[in-house]
């Protein structure tokens, strides 16, 4: 019996049927993001061919040299979502301030936060990169959205997802009713359901972290890392180390195969005492996905989804993946760190 062919559009529509009061705005917003992903996927695939590589000569708000592809991805996400009347405000890793809806265009009930192309430093070496997004309902009364609409904790997300541009392009999303993966068929330009109801496997296979920075970690994280390698007093089942240095790729592997990814706080750079990754548009959306797949995400002491952001680009330590491995990180940090 041939597998049923389900496009992401049909899947989103069927998910909406679970919400009789749905007006279709939310459904159409997810469609728009899937379309933006197809446009970005086309460019990332051609990146090496159309000389789009190389620095755009601009610096982004993070003070990092911007690759042209992340400028392009940022523009696609903004242009795809500015005129539809579904959003009241957006926030992007590439923009210092909130992105308001242009004058003369309607505002809607939702808020979109995103990292348009995470891991863009990996483009030149053909390592998988990704787009991460989260969707909130607005909290402000009406009119143009505000920064408060963006500064919501992950436990207020109504949907989240990511796109991984790799050997194949996949889009993974959740609206709180399971986590579902779609693979892009570039021939027809459709995301087809390939991974229904993703659940993180009970038995983990990997741990993912940059051991090159171990000397900058707290004692609790160092002991946790020893435990993961079976060198502690209570050895864990043997795990392999896999780390590609691209958050979406590292997260995706642990989601499908079981494992833990962590980017802890480190003392290397006084500017980033809380680690490198961003709370609003990296850690929180992936935490939503992990929890809906049976996993968990923590900053080492509390659930990522409980942290209320105080600024758009604030960073957080991140431990994410198989629940028992992440909870163990909290145990070691609680035991060894003040
Ligand atoms: P490091 C990519 O630059 C990124 O923002 C994430 O995608 C990735 O997880 C992390 O940084 C890798 O950082 O310090 O290990 O190179």
Image: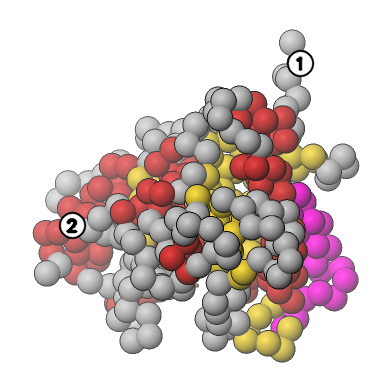
Which disc is residue 2 wearing?
1
* Residue at (19% x, 69% y) in the render: 219
Question: Which region of the structure is painted magenta?
Answer: 34-55
136 with respect to 270 (left or right): right
263 with respect to 142 (left or right): left
Report x, y in % for residue 40.
75, 59
According to the image, label 2 marks what residue? 332
Label 1: how many Cα within 10 Å (few below 14, some 14–19, many 20+): few
Q: Where 54 falls versus 287 (above or below)? A: below
User: Does dot 1 land on a helix, a strand or a loop?
Assistant: loop
The answer to which image quadrant residue 203 occupies is top left
* Residue at (53% x, 40% y) in the render: 174
Q: Where 271 falls versus 169 (above or below)? A: below
249 with respect to 290 (left or right): right
For ligand 1, tell me if the residue under mark 1 lies within 8 Å.
no
Q: Can residue 205 be seen in the rendering of this structure?
A: no
Label 2: how many Cα within 10 Å (few below 14, some 14–19, many 20+): many
Report x, y in % for residue 294.
39, 36
């Amino acid at each position: 019996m041939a597998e049923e062919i389900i496009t992401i559009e049909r899947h989103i529509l069927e998910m909406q049927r679970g919400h009789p009061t749905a007006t279709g705005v939310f459904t159409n917003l997810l469609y728009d993001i899937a379309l933006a992903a197809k446009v970005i996927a086309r460019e990332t695939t051609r990146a090496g061919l159309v000389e789009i590589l190389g620095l755009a000569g601009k610096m982004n708000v993070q003070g990092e040299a911007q690759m042209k592809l992340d400028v392009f991805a940022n523009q696609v996400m903004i242009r795809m979502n500015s005129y539809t009347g579904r959003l009241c405000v957006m926030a992007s890793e590439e923009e210092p301030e909130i992105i308001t809806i242009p004058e003369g265009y309607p505002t809607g009930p939702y808020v979109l936060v995103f990292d348009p192309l995470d891991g863009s430093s990996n483009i030149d070496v053909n390592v998988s990169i990704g787009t991460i997004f989260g969707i909130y309902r607005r909290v402000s009364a009406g009119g143009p959205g505000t920064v408060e609409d963006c500064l919501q904790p992950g436990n207020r997300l109504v949907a989240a997802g990511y796109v991984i541009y790799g050997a194949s392009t996949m889009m993974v999303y959740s609206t709180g009713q399971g986590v579902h993966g779609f693979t892009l068929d570039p021939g027809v330009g459709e995301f087809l359901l390939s991974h229904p109801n993703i659940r993180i496997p009970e038995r983990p296979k990997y741990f993912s972290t940059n051991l090159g920075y171990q000397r900058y970690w707290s004692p609790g994280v160092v002991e946790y890392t020893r435990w993961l390698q079976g060198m502690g007093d209570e050895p864990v089942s043997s795990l392999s180390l896999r780390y590609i240095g691209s958050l979406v790729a590292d997260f995706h592997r642990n989601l499908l195969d079981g494992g833990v990814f962590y980017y802890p706080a480190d003392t290397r750079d006084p500017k980033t005492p809380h680690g490198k990754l961003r709370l609003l548009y990296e850690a929180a959306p992936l935490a939503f996905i992990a929890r809906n797949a049976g996993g968990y995400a923590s900053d080492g002491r509390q659930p990522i989804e409980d942290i209320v952001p105080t600024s758009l680009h604030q960073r957080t330590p991140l431990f994410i993946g198989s629940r028992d491995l992440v909870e163990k990180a909290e145990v070691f940090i609680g035991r060894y760190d003040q």
